Amino acid sequence: MNLDLLNSATAFVWAEADLLDHAEYAAWLDLWTPDGLYIVPIDPDTEDFADTLNYANDDADMRARRVARLTSGESVSTQPRARTVRGVSRLRILRGDAGAVTLRGAQDLRDFRKGCFHQHTADVTWDLVRNGDTWRIRRKVVRLINSIDTLSTVGYVL
């Protein structure tokens, strides 16, 4: 096991979680490659994200639009902004080297909005590519453990 690679990739995804929890969306958008995809599938077993229904299948333009909606104040589903805390754990390198890595982990996201508390748990896979001394996200797949159930109360990036 390459602990330096694991530590570097882990530090990156922990920083991503922190940016999202503190609504630092512009900095979050900068973490992505131009061709990066943010995917939240409904079917827990699918690998064919282009031909199946997803909660999100965002390229760079759609990620920017999602952030604009979250920050505009015009969307009822995002006002007031939910307070979120996500824990990212159980990180494991599936494949990788100094130039690219595929990392899988667990995410436990809790939110509080309008007096209600919710929890969303997911298996997440990040495909990261090296960019100087840091990483960029080429693809992030968030597989909610209850994805085939009704998803409600989400007015933020999973």
Image (spheres, rainbow, N blue to C red):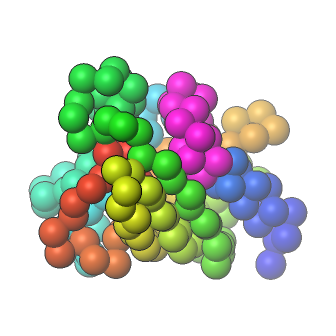
Q: Position of residue 6 (x, y in %)?
A: 76, 66
> Which quarter of the rendered picture does the C terminus lie within?
bottom left
Q: Nearer the viewer, residue 80 or 60?
A: 80
Q: Is residue 109 above or below residue 113?
A: below
What segment is highlighted magenta in the picture? Answer: 16-32
Q: Position of residue 100 (x, y in %)?
A: 64, 53
Direction from residue 62 to residue 85 in the image, left or right = right
Residue 130 lies in the magenta-colored region: no
Q: Nearer the viewer, residue 67 or 42?
A: 67
Direction from residue 136 to residue 37 in the image, left or right = left
Q: Position of residue 108 (x, y in %)?
A: 51, 70
Direction from residue 105 to residue 36 in the image, left or right = left
Q: Nearer the viewer, residue 124 or 74?
A: 74
Magenta stretch, main secondary structure, is helix
- Residue at x 28% of width, y 67% of height: 47
Q: Nearer the viewer, residue 120 or 4?
A: 120
Residue 88 appears in the figure:
yes
